[in-house]
Amino acid sequence: MSRREKLLHELPFGVDYAKSARARCKYCEMNIPKGELRLSVRYPSHKFMKMQDNWLHERCFWKSVRKDELSEATIYGFEALEWEDQEMLREKIILNEKEIKKDEELNDADVKDIPLVSSGKVKEALKVQSEMLSEIKKELIEFKFKLKDFDEIFKANEYHIREDEGISECIEQLSDFIVFGVPSKCPKCKEGTLYYDYTGHAYKCDGTGEKSCVFSDPNPERKSLNVGEDWAENGFLEGRKLPMLKERSYPPGAHVKMDTVTDYPRDRIRRPTRFGKHLEDES
């Protein structure tokens, strides 16, 4: 499968906390404050061969976006949110359920009966891992580690910092290692390294410099994190037994493949004009 084809299987929506105050909401056109929860309609940029986000205020998202494919499992980055924000979004997804009109692809027998949000034991497991990951991330931020520090502990565990990764990505990656353990080398190509991918809800092989690999596994074989002398000396993780959990839990529908991305994100967003009308209402 080509990179272009892979883009068409990416998740249609995204969520995170604004990294700066530069992004403008695609609905009200006001800036989104730094640190504020925001949602996006994602689409493939074939020019840059990656996904791009059309960011909206959380409040604007619900009144402006066509949400026929919205569920907990179709929002990129959902599981990285604080638990309270996850719960708030789950409630709104449920309230929105009556408005959802699924496309033909989503009415297949293997998809239509999948719950839109998690519940019961699955939800309990998700809460435990979410709170553990959140706690570890906060500790990593407080320690103010630099890229060279992450590079050191990654190399001690046969990992490396990828070209497009910064401090925030390293924190995400290391938190995963601490809570669940370090994935072993790819069992298919024998050389590639497995990284967690929010789109596929699985750990995917990044291949090698010469060849690509399509292996993925929701819960691959793992080993405990090798903390290293320098990290042990600063007291980080002192008193914790690693890994903290045996495996990662996932929301319902996380591993159902759907062609959900449109090349035209404007098809999903109702944007007001200065006259108070919406773009699609204008002739």
Image (cartoon, rainbow, N blue to C red):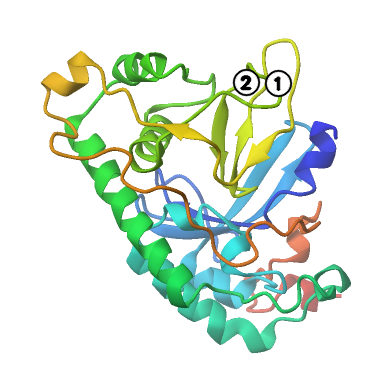
Which residue is tagged 1? 189
Q: What residue is shown at x 79% (from left), y 73% (from top)?
A: 280
Please state which of residues 211 and 5 is positioned toward the viewer in this rendering.
211
Q: Quadrant of the N terminus?
A: top right
- Regarding mark 2 in the picture, which secondary structure is present there? loop
10 Å crowding of disc 2: few (<14), some (14-19), many (20+): many
Residue 184 place in picture, x, y as percent: 52, 27
Q: Residue furthest top?
A: 210
Return the x and y of residue 190 as percentages of the image width and height: 65, 19
Confirm or deny contact between disc 2 and disc 1 (CB under 8 A): yes
Q: Residue 194's image quarter?
A: top right
Mark 1 is surrounded, within 10 Å at the Cα level, by few (under 14), some (14 to 19) or many (20 or more) other residues, namely some
Disc number placed over residue 134 in the picture, else none? none
Count of numbered labels shown in the rendering: 2
Q: Is residue 113 above or below residue 150?
A: below
The quarter of the picture where the C terminus appears is: bottom right
Q: Say whether residue 219 is left or right of residue 110.
A: left
From the viewer's perspective, is the residue at label 2 or at label 1 nearer?
1
- Is residue 21 depicted above or below 1 in this figure? below
> Which residue does the numbered mark 2 point to in the structure image?
192
Q: Quadrant of residue 233?
A: top left
Left of 202 or right of it: where is 46?
A: right
